[in-house]
Amino acid sequence: MAATLLAAAVVLAGCSSPAPQDDAPSEPTDDQFPVTITHAFGDTTIPEKPQRIVALSTNDLAVAQAAGAPVVGATRNVTDSGPVPPYLDPLPDEVLAISSDTPTVSAEQIAAFEPDLILAVSSWQVTDQATYDQLTAIAPVVAPAEGLYVGSMQDDAHQVGRAIGEQQKVEELISTAEGQLADIREQLPGLAGKTYLYGQARGEILPMIVGEQNQTTMFMRALGLDIPESFRDAPASDGLAPGTVGVSYEEVGRLSDADLLVMTFASDDDQERFEGHELVQRVRAVAEGNYVPVDLDTAVALQAPNPVSTGWLLDQLRPSLEKLAG
């Protein structure tokens, strides 16, 4: 199920949402309420500092929890490794009571938490106006500034910080994450100029996330890595999100343009097929030992990184990055 949800997120990533309003969002201090926040579905006014927050994505939960905000309800981790990702502090089952294995959220379930703020900045379950409008009948809802995974992880974290009235704490989280990225760049200067590809083996197609504005791309570029030139500005494949290119097994030789190949899998069968395929074994990164299969927790964190997950994610990738850097 987690692999299916990740696949759904690959399809949704970068999908257009209604354009944000032209008016610039207000920039409150931590204790300045009411505050109006502009996002993809319009404007949301939060009358006072929230005391009962529902977080509808792991990233929303991660930033709110790390900033000390009062989260009373949240979606469970999409993988089977545990109720929350490995980099988050545990929470009671009664808080992690919102299902993450359905395409939409239950308004009734959310209403039962009696929230005064709903965070849906990184929620793949709230990507249309109708769902947003339904939730606004319960409490103020804050969505991404432009669209799901369109902005940087810093942009999304700032959106959460404004909503919960903890801008300074969130700014500190962002500063820490940026420092962790800068440390890797400094410690592994050999990464500069190297290329990578990140994708998923799913049936007959290998969707590769290569969009310029994708959060994965921005994260890896912060390390000095870039998409191979042959994949930059490539048109999206039918049925996949903007910035996602589907590669067939017959075309798998194209992956040799990358120095590093990071892959996740929709199923064990998909991984077995991929790794056993004769043409895959000839791909340059595979032959040179720079192929990295990642588990679903790492895959989700790499597709949609956040300031809280950054250190943990870099720890997972570091052995491969060290080898690539020489």
Image (cartoon, grey):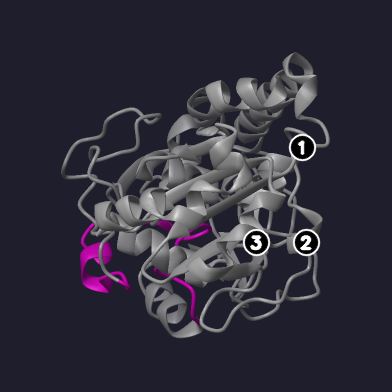
Give the residue at x 35% y 70%: 138
Give the residue at x 47% y 60%: 120
Q: Secondary structure at mark 1?
A: loop
Q: Amino acid at mark 2?
A: Ser
Please state the extent of the stretch shown in magenta in the rendering.
Answer: 103-128
Q: Amino acid at mark 3?
A: Ile
First reached walking from the N terminus: tag 1 or tag 2: 1
Residue 108, given in percent of the width and then of the height, sits at: 22, 71
Residue indicated by mark 3:
37
Q: Is residue 114 magenta?
A: yes
Q: Image height check: is 62 above or below 76?
A: above
Residue indicated by mark 1:
194
Q: Secondary structure at mark 3?
A: strand
Residue 88, given in percent of the width and then of the height, sits at: 38, 31
Q: CA distance from mark 3 to mark 1?
A: 39 Å
Residue indicated by mark 2:
230
Q: Secondary structure at mark 2?
A: helix
Magenta portion: prevailing SS class = loop
Q: Image height check: is 19 above or below 194?
A: below
